[in-house]
Image (cartoon, helix red, strand yellow):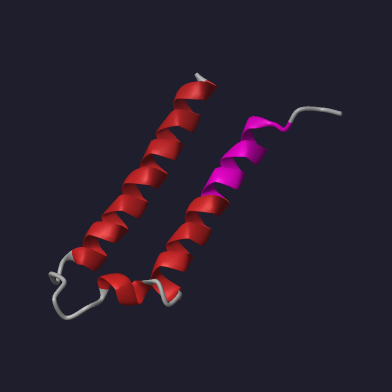
Amino acid sequence: MRAPSANVKFLDLVLVIFVAAAFLFASPVHLLWMTPEAPWYVPYLIWLGVIVVTGVVHHRRHRDEL
């Protein structure tokens, strides 16, 4: 059996990030950080985290191709 290519591994990581982000924003879990006592910027911090993780994955893939 052949080992998965780098593109398949990258797509797997992107899919995991997408599912995790969808879980954070579309499931009842969002009620944990959407309380009235939470600061207004919490959703933006979570989006920033998703963007940073995606950027790190992309950077690692780009670095591995060189």
Q: Going 72% across and 33% down the picture, which residue do you hit?
A: 4
Residue 61 part of the magenta-drawn span: no
Left or right relative to 30: residue 35: left
17 vs 37, nearest the viewer: 37
Q: Going 16% across and 81% down the picture, which residue do you hit?
A: 36
Q: Is residue 54 above or below residue 64?
A: below
Residue at the farthest top position: 66
Left or right relative to 52: residue 6: right
Q: Going 41% across and 33% down the picture, which residue do you hit?
A: 59
Percent coordinates x, y for residue 41 in the rendering: 16, 66
Q: Is residue 7 above or below residue 15?
A: above
6 vs 53, nearest the viewer: 53
28 vs 17, nearest the viewer: 28
Q: Looking at the rendering, in which quadrant would you find the N terminus?
A: top right
How many numbered dots are placed on residues in this image?
A: 0
Percent coordinates x, y for residue 61 in the rendering: 50, 31
Q: Quadrant of residue 5?
A: top right
Q: Magenta region: which residues? A: 4-14
Residue at the farthest bottom position: 36
Percent coordinates x, y for residue 52 in the rendering: 32, 45
Percent coordinates x, y for residue 63 in the rendering: 45, 24
Looking at the magenta stretch, what is its main secondary structure?
helix
